[in-house]
Image (tube, helix red, strand yellow):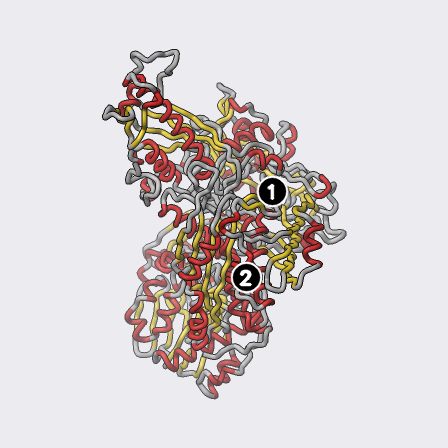
Amino acid sequence: MTSSTGIGASLLRKEDQRFLMGRGNYVSDIKRPGMTMGAFLRSPHAHARILAIRSDAALAMPGVLAVLTGEDLRADGVGGLPCAWPVTGKGGAPTKEPTHPPLAQDKVRHVGDPVAFIIAESLLQARNAAEAVEVDYEALPAVGGVLEAIKPGAPAVFEDIPDNVCVDWELGDKAATDAAFQGAAHVARISLVNNRLVGNPMEPRAAIGEYDSSREHYTLWTTSQFPHIVKLLMGNFVLGIAQHKLRVVSPDVGGGFGVKQFHYAEEALVTWGSRRVGRPVKWVAERSEGFISDAHGRDHVTEAEMALSEDGHFLGLRVRTIANMGGYLSTFGPNIPTNLYGPLLAGVYTTPAIYCEVKAVFTNTVPVDAYRGAGRPEATFVLERLVDVAAAELGIDRAEIRRRNMIPPGAYPYQTPVMMEYDSGDPGGCLAKALLKADWDGFAQRKGQSAARGKLRGIGLCTYVEACGLAPSRIAASLGVRGGLFESAAVRVHPTGEVTVLMGSHNHGQGHETTFAQIASELLGIPADKVEIVFGDTDRVQFGLGTYGSRSLAVGGSALVKATNKVITKGKKIAAHMFEAAEADIEFKDGSFTVAGTDRHKPFAEIALSAHFPVNFPLETLEPGLEEQAFYDPVNFTFPCGAHIAELEIDPETGTVELLSYIAVDDIGTVINPMIVEGQIVGGIVQGIGQALYEDCIYDQESGQLLSGSFMDYCLPRADNFPLISVETNITACTHNPLGSKGCGELGTIGSPATVINAVVDALSHLGVNHVDMPATPNRLWRIIANAGAAPVVP
Amino acid sequence: MRTFEYLRPATLQEALGSLSGLANSKPMAGGMTLIPAMKMRLSTPARLVDLGGLEELRGIRVDAAAVTVGASSTHESVANSALVRAAIPALCEVAGGIGDPQVRNRGTLGGSIANNDPAADYPAALLGLDAQVLTTRRTLSAAEFFVGLFDTALGDGELITAVRFPVPAAAAYEKFKSPASRYAMVGVFAARTAGGVRVAVTGAGAGVFRAGVIEAALEEKFSVDALTSLRFPSDGLNTDIHADAQYCAHLVGVLARRAVARILYVGRR
Ligand SMILES: Cc1cc2nc3c(=O)[nH]c(=O)nc-3n(C[C@H](O)[C@H](O)[C@H](O)COP(=O)(O)OP(=O)(O)OC[C@H]3O[C@@H](n4cnc5c(N)ncnc54)[C@H](O)[C@@H]3O)c2cc1C
């Protein structure tokens, strides 16, 4: 039965009831008996030696319980924050993984590096005491950007890594790619910067640690996208807490975008601190603290070239990127600009030879890690900008050059020259739909109308592929990950037929409580409101890897299907026993167990009841109870793809961009809840447009000071910056998971930066412009226009 | 934030006493600027004297010559005042373009000009209209009042009570919002007044200033054409991560032309 609450229904989000009523339960809402408050003293320097820390005055202040420093960590044998996904560089060279102490030891390496953790009865007392801690610094020369960091003689972030290179990585066949360039009729080139971003989830990070000496047991409440991984990393590598003595809870979390999928120093410090003071310790980041302590995203400098035949066929692609790792390695840092970047350079095209080199470097900035899209927007930006440059230089229509090189529908599964085998996809279908919807052919007329009003109109297009559904453990292990990437689900059927589902993935805005309930509803034939989704507590939920990399549905949802099918299988056993029929003769359909070919049937709830009152069960062959668990490890990544088109106007007098329309047509596999999918895609697109037009995390390249550390200077876009975004789908099912779903959490960020910049460049193409760096701010565009000598239009 | 004493006096007399009674006392109007500064510990008053209860600082009065706006008038109340709209519609535009609805419902004229943020909107209107700032001690012209970056002529314990805006023949305000803060990256207030053409610029420099070259060109001929070939000098203008000085100078020109066009073609006054 496709019940009205099953797969494909635009069910209103179950969780919105409590969110809209202000009844969410976030970490900062939690109060523990005897709870104390923590505050950090953070480094004002980008790079400095710590000569001395004097905390006597602070300790003597009212209410102050502890002032903890890197030396205290040393004394207690607390370890560094581990990197979970190093990669192997050229010639087998390992990633350099310098120690990342939770509180700075000897040196600070970025503005915001925590130097002391102050615990007091109240937040006010902790803050006052933080101001009273005296630190003697010897300021050192700093590097604020990747180009500064690789200059010979640049200050070294780590003394034992004098060239600041964390790993020098490569992918693809260099010889074959060189050969492709040698024979090429045309080579298109581009150099670009992928601007650094700050994720800024609405809820800042927060954590509470609580040590129970009577049980020698720790509990950590934290704003995490993956509580089980925090438990493993923090317990095992940082604090040395046995896993059965540690519980990690991530309750309602107000957005993550990747920012909350790392193990952070503050989590370890509240946990450790709670044992030091013998009371629970709470810390809640302020927004400005988030700017200097949340891992940042993107930050690449890239040169790329594409070899083409005379008729515009892509023959080869060569990419050299320098990626910023920041002042320490964050949990997944080195993996993002390598494994999640290089393989995506194939895009949706048949380019036969690709070679990519990535130098990941340390700088005196906040660590850089995954931010929604993570590596894939960066790759798509390089490729799709280059395709536009090539199209312009060869005089081929931008849609046509993409069609000419696109993987044809019959060619799936398609092996790219850079690692990935795409199982399915119809980017051509997406493109055709998007062109039609955007009235691509009617653009010239609209451009004319804009020109009559003194405006420069542009249209931009991008086709993209995403690799997500992270991840097949076998493949990921070969790429360096230290751990599995499966997902888990448990289906607990209550005696009365209602169902509690325990998911190893984590819901922090994605609507899981609704989507997963719909899957259970569909498979079990019960209404979604009889299904409760539980997540985010390592004591309640079996081990799971959490939510990131657009994996929750493709991997977690598949685990749920598997677990639910086990419930149905068990239910058939029970039904067979009750009907005294053969198990093979029992069918389950529309919420009923039926003896095939008869009208004898029992509803799901009745079987659930018998499972819990096994009065005459044959106990050797049939266990009581109805609860099943499943772990699912995918055989491949999933590959959503699509085509996006943006149309915009530039005011040549001021350089202001006004987006007029944005059209997305995406192939995301099976859709469970179209309304939630639309929300996810629009949200991603908005963040991608944010990168293209507004957001820019700026460090002074020489001093390493953060210049955009608040919303006064970091331009987070607002609703009035956007037109209505049109979202459509063009579905092919994923061939290797039971739902056929691919994922939709990140894809909006992947195609949109290139789409918007392609439109901006199109609007300026008459000036000979072939690239504009992000964000395309009014000042930047006005400069380009002014330099091109185009006299400003007068109203 | 640090701990502080909070007082809400009922009369101006009482307020002045409270302010002078303890060192490091500060008046608070809407709190839209002061409270964030206190949260970040950039401002750490020992005593906060809330002006919200003072009748003397409220109200908008209009006569033939001027619009007098009480210091405690919120941006929203000015933006929506029929009296102001009838006399100086450009003033409604200035107030209505500040921040967002929450800020406009709390933030006040007095708080805005006392703060004298170099990117604030009201200072352009005051200087452009040659307004007078009425305080508990004296009356100052706008030019005297705005001293420099976040600095005014106000003395310790001196309160703004109202601002008197002479009614111009016509005026218009053009604001180019900084994409992040939405304060004025550049704002130009142009007015035809009894004393001649006045053009005040906010956002572009260390504080509000008059654009003399533009005023001179417009005195000669009040038209858009008069400004077409004029290149506003960028010396001394701001360069930061959002805008460089040349861009600011360019925007001054663009916005001045747009303001003049509005005065000439859209609406009188
Ligand atoms: C999100 C946001 C956006 C904003 N956007 C803009 C914008 O686009 N344009 C713009 O111009 N402004 C903007 N502002 C600032 C806004 O206009 C503030 O309201 C204003 O600057 C301060 O007014 P207030 O009444 O809140 O003053 P308060 O914050 O209470 O006080 C500010 C200062 O003035 C002093 N003060 C207050 N009243 C008096 C008085 N009567 N006499 C003497 N001193 C006094 C206080 O002691 C304090 O030093 C924005 C503010 C915010 C928070």
- In depth, the one of B57 and A223 nearer the eye is A223
Q: Residue at x 59, y 64 (%)?
A: A311
Q: Residue at x 38, y 30 (%)?
A: A501
- Measured as percent of width and height from the top left, residue A566 is found at 40, 26
- Measured as percent of width and height from the top left, residue A101 is found at 63, 36
Quarter of the image with the C terminus of chain B is: bottom left
Mark 2 residue's CB less than 8 Å from ligand 1: no
- Measured as percent of width and height from the top left, residue A444 is found at 45, 72
Q: Which mark is residue A401?
A: 2
Q: Is residue A499 left or right of residue A730?
A: left
Which chain contains the residue that carries disc 1? A
Q: Quadrant of ligand 1?
A: bottom left
Residue flagged by tag 2: what amino acid is it?
A: Ile
Note whether B112 is above or below B200 in the view shown. above
Q: How many marks?
A: 2
Q: Which mark is residue A335?
A: 1
- In depth, the one of A408 and A503 nearer the eye is A408
Which residue extends farthest left?
A599
